[in-house]
Image: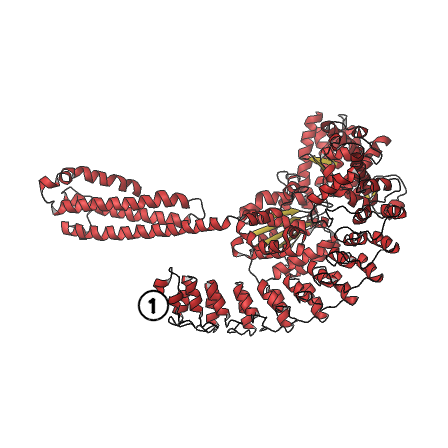
């Protein structure tokens, strides 16, 4: 190694000539040769010092912190140069000592003078090379340190990032973890598919994978996430949709953002504007979340990103089309990005058809697993053979019986992984007679489909067990999230008639888990102490509509439980549990089930067919004077501070109407409750019912004389509340009953402003159809079009413009919708406004044009777009400042160059006589300053106070102006 050679050579030279060096005074002047050798020793020591500094300090820092290739090349070059230098030096020194040589010294080193000249030059060249390389590595080290500093989040940024990780309920990683690992040899039908291989090689694009239920889509998704996709070096983010509890696109976007910000912390900057504007409510706004996600993945610093969205068929139907539209828009955008999205779903026509635009744009997007049934069936066969071997060992079956069983199972058509799982669980619990006839008879009794297997699992129960199983399955169907084993224990045993914890007769959790599994069989799985259905098909097998239930001619489990019944069961359990606090002190009640019951009881009661016997219990826990009310209400206000409930005590009627418990509300009204009773914020029972879209309760209150236009302390009416929720049936009811469609709140926001702000396009259309003022201005002069533009909601903007919205409406600061669009840098909305005739040079009250906004916010693409469309590049604001002034002041070199290339006046003077060069020098922007000077900026321009750029320059850049000949 060069380093070792440099370390030892000076020592050898020193030892050889030590007597002359140590006794220089006695020996007199050194000979020419000795002096050269001494200089050579010092030179080599200097080289060693530089090399050691490079290798020990810089290399250790750089290695492992990024791409090592460039650094490795630098090291190889240093070693090579050093070895050549040492070889030449050794050859020359040996030659001058008269020793025999295998190699001949270079021609330039045949004499002492030659050695001195060569040594001086070589040492200088070597030192310069080492210093140059050391500088390069130091720069790389500094670059890495700056990157790490940028990746360190502020407290506010960290709080924003954590907002996207669920604190209530189960997290996105839990849902992935509960999916089974693949069996070796499976998933090959997908991994070998040409469309998958092409998608992996692409920089960007979608991939849609469909397959029948039970064919392992989620198992495939987990395998890809854990094993295959990380090989691409992309940031991999995922979300597993789950019916009931993880089924909205806002939940999906939060999960994707959290994972992306964990892997690339710097990207959280794209969320800060929305977070500052909306706070914690950002996590429920799908529009705002998607804007953040779009900006983040389009940031070059994001690098390649892969997103996996599993089980789209379990997404809330009202969200599905919105999600597809957003994905289409992402891949249609001209903003460069390296994002790939993998989607899985069932192959149902009504689902696949919604992707037709993506399929047209990306012909190779589809991988239809339903057309690979033979390949999947063969892979299922691997599972069958594997499980049959295990079963044979367990049951001590002879090889011929094992083979017979496998042959019999292979005869089943449309085999799926789920079917195999259910069948072998059934077989493991059966006593198997060890004869061929018995095995054949056993096969004839096996379920040939998943539904048949489900029916067999539950039919083995006796009547009492069936009743308990029905209750347990109803609870799992309706639960808003998977319940823990302990919560499930309470839910199964609590009733509206319970008065103490002893009435519940709870058994220990470990025993209850065994009991639950015995009761429900394979329908129920427990993962990390949480209870859930084995598969989505289990829920679908049980659930029935009212008409399906009525059509059932014989007792069966399939389609036997309605949604209303399921909610009624768990709702009764929640209310019964909460009522315990009215009969016992809080210390006497186990609070394990409290959090779930407090948060969710109202939702379940609203969804249930509430029978009269439980209504009094509902009134009991909603009585502001009751212990139960105090317990759950305070908890809900703390746990969900943005749920619309006031922390101040409100009437029992308002609470009941908030949750939409119409039968309990009617009972309370019959007892004389005030239909217009308002809390300290002026909100009435009608406000609460309308806010949550409870049409039946709204109708009841109106029939009982509720004031339809009652305004709260913020001036908002029940119609404002209904619009925020986007419940069209409730909005129509209020309008039909005479609600003021243009009622203005304390900020002069009309219901149309609200609808536009939250992005409910259907509600916007409904209000416009009913005569809402499309150009109504709020207290800041902003119209609904301003709000739609600010939020980047292109669909709403088009609707408003089609209906006649004033495209150049100016707010109280003179700002038009185009100003809002350019400030946000939303290219799509800018083009839409310009195409529809927006004034590209509209000036606000400070004479800022849209171009000023685009430049100040560093939106280069927007700047180019505006200039292409004819924006005045030298427009003056009220202080005489042009866009170039703003760019120079901000130190944004790229924008400065862009404006200069497009003809901006480099010496334009503002109202103080200052040019862009004054701005750049005052703020110490060295690169911008040099660019302006190189382009011919007047370095001696004098402002109205007689100051030149040098006169206002910061200390850091003053020398540059002096070197360029500037004067004060």
Badge 1 crowding class, 10 Å Cα cut-off, few under 14, some 14 to 19, many 20 or more, is few
Residue 941 position within the rendered picture, expressed as x and y whole percent measured from the top left: 40, 72
In this picture the colour scheme is secondary structure
Residue 107 seen in this snapshot: no
Q: Nearer the viewer, residue 680 or 826?
A: 680
The residue carrying mark 1 is 964
306 relative position to 769: left or right: left
Q: Secondary structure at mark 1?
A: loop
| The C terminus lies in quadrant | bottom left
Residue drawn 42% across and 64% down? 922
Residue 830 position within the rendered picture, expressed as x and y whole percent measured from the top left: 61, 67
Is 63 located above or below residue 824 in the figure?
above
| The N terminus lies in quadrant | top left
Is 305 located above or below residue 408 in the figure?
below
Residue drawn 29% across and 49% down? 81
Q: Nearer the viewer, residue 521 or 877?
A: 877
Residue 427 position within the rendered picture, expressed as x and y whole percent measured from the top left: 75, 31
Q: Nearer the viewer, residue 385 or 636?
A: 636
Which quarter of the picture shows residue 350? bottom right
Residue 173 seen in this snapshot: yes
Is 533 located above or below residue 811 in the figure?
above
Which quarter of the picture shows residue 954? bottom left
143 relative position to 498: left or right: left
Residue drawn 87% across and 56% down? 705
Q: Nearer the viewer, residue 148 or 531?
A: 148
Number of marks in the image?
1
Residue drawn 60% across and 62% down? 333
């Amino acid at each position: 190694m060069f380093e070792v050679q440099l370390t030892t050579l000076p020592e050898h030279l020193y030892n050889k000539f030590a007597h002359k060096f140590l006794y220089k005074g006695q020996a007199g002047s050194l000979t020419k040769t000795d002096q050269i050798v001494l200089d050579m020793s010092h030179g080599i020591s200097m080289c060693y010092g530089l090399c050691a500094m490079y290798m020990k300090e810089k290399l250790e820092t750089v290695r492992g912190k990024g791409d090592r290739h460039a650094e490795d090349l630098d090291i190889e070059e240093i070693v090579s140069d050093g070895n050549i230098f040492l070889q030449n030096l050794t050859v020359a020194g040996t030659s001058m000592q008269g020793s025999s040589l295998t190699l001949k010294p270079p021609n330039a080193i045949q004499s002492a003078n030659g050695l001195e000249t060569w040594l001086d030059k070589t040492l200088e060249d070597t030192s310069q090379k080492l210093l140059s390389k050391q500088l390069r590595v130091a720069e790389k080290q500094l670059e890495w340190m700056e990157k790490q500093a940028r990746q360190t989040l502020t407290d506010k940024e960290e709080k924003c990032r954590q907002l996207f990780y669920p604190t209530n309920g189960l997290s996105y990683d839990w849902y992935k973890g509960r999916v089974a690992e693949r069996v070796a040899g499976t998933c090959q039908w997908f991994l070998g598919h040409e469309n998958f291989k092409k998608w992996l090689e692409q920089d960007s694009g979608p991939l849609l994978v469909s397959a029948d239920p039970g064919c392992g889509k989620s198992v495939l998704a987990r395998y890809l996430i854990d094993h295959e996709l990380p090989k691409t070096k992309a940031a991999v983010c995922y979300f597993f949709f789950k019916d009931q509890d993880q089924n909205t696109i806002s939940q999906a976007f939060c999960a994707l953002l959290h994972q992306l910000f964990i892997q690339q912390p710097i990207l959280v900057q794209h969320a800060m504007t929305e977070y500052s504007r909306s706070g914690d409510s950002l996590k429920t706004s799908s529009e705002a979340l998607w804007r953040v996600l779009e900006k983040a993945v389009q940031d070059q610093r994001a690098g390649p990103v892969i997103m996996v969205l599993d089980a789209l068929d379990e997404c809330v139907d009202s969200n599905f089309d919105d999600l597809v539209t957003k994905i289409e828009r992402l891949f249609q955008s001209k903003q460069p990005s390296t994002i790939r999205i993998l989607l899985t779903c069932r192959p149902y026509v009504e689902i696949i058809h919604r992707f037709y635009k993506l399929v047209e744009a990306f012909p190779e997007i589809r991988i239809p697993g339903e057309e690979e049934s033979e390949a999947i069936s063969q892979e299922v066969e691997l599972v069958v053979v594997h499980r049959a071997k295990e079963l044979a060992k367990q049951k001590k079956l002879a090889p011929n019986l094992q083979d017979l069983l496998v042959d019999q199972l292979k005869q089943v058509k449309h085999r799926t992984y789920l079917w195999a799982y259910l069948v072998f669980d059934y077989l493991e619990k059966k006593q198997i007679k060890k004869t061929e006839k018995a095995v054949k008879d056993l096969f004839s009794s096996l379920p040939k489909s998943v539904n048949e297997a489900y029916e067999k699992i539950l039919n083995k129960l006796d009547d009492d067990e069936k009743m308990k199983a029905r209750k347990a399955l109803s609870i799992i169907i309706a639960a808003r999230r998977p319940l823990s084993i302990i919560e499930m224990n309470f839910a199964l045993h609590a009733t509206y008639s319970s008065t103490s914890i002893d009435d519940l007769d709870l058994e220990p959790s470990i025993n209850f888990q065994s009991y639950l599994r015995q009761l429900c069989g394979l329908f129920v799985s427990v993962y990390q102490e949480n209870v859930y259905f084995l598969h989505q098909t289990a829920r679908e097998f049980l659930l029935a509509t009212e008409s399906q239930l009525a059509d059932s001619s014989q007792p069966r489990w399939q389609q036997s439980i309605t949604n209303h019944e399921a909610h009624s069961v768990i709702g009764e359990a929640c209310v019964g549990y909460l009522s315990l606090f009215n009969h016992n002190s809080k210390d006497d009640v186990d609070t394990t089930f409290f959090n779930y019951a407090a948060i969710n009881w109202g939702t379940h009661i609203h969804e249930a067919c509430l029978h009269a016997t439980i209504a009094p219990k509902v009134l009991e826990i909603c009585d502001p004077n009751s212990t139960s009310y105090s317990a759950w209400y305070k908890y809900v206000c703390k746990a969900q501070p943005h749920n619309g409930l006031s922390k101040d005590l409100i009437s029992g009627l308002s609470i009941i109407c908030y949750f939409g418990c119409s039968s309990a509300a009617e009972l309370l009204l019959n007892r004389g409750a005030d239909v217009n009773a308002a809390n300290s914020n002026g909100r009435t029972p009608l406000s609460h019912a309308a806010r949550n879209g409870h049409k039946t309760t709204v109708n009841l209150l109106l029939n009982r004389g509720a004031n339809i236009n009652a305004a709260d302390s913020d001036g908002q009416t029940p119609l404002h509340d209904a619009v925020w929720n986007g419940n069209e049936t409730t909005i129509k009811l209020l309008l039909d009953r005479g609600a003021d469609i243009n009622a203005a709140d304390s900020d002069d926001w009309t219901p149309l402003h609200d609808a536009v702000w939250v992005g409910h396009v259907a509600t916007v259309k409904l209000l416009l159809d009913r005569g809402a003022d499309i150009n109504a201005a709020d207290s800041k002069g902003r119209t609904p079009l301003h709000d739609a533009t600010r939020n980047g909601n292109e669909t709403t903007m088009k609707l408003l413009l089609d209906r006649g919205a004033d495209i150049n409406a100016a707010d109280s600061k003179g700002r038009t919708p185009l100003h809002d669009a350019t400030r946000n840098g939303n290219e799509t909305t800018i083009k839409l406004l310009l195409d529809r005739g927006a004034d590209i040079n509209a000036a606000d009250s400070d004479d800022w044009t849209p171009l000023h906004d685009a430049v100040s916010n560093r939106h280069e693409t927007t700047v180019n777009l505006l200039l292409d469309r004819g924006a005045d590049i030298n427009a003056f604001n009220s202080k005489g400042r042009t866009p170039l002034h703003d760019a120079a002041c901000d130190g944004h070199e790229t924008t400065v160059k862009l404006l200069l290339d497009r003809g901006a006046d480099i010496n334009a003077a503002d109202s103080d006589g200052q040019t862009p060069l004054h701005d750049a020098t005052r703020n110490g922007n060295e690169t911008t300053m040099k660019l302006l000077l190189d382009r011919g900026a007047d370095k001696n321009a004098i402002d109205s106070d007689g100051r030149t750029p040098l006169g206002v320059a910061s200390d850091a850049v003053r020398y540059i102006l002096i070197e360029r000949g500037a004067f004060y």
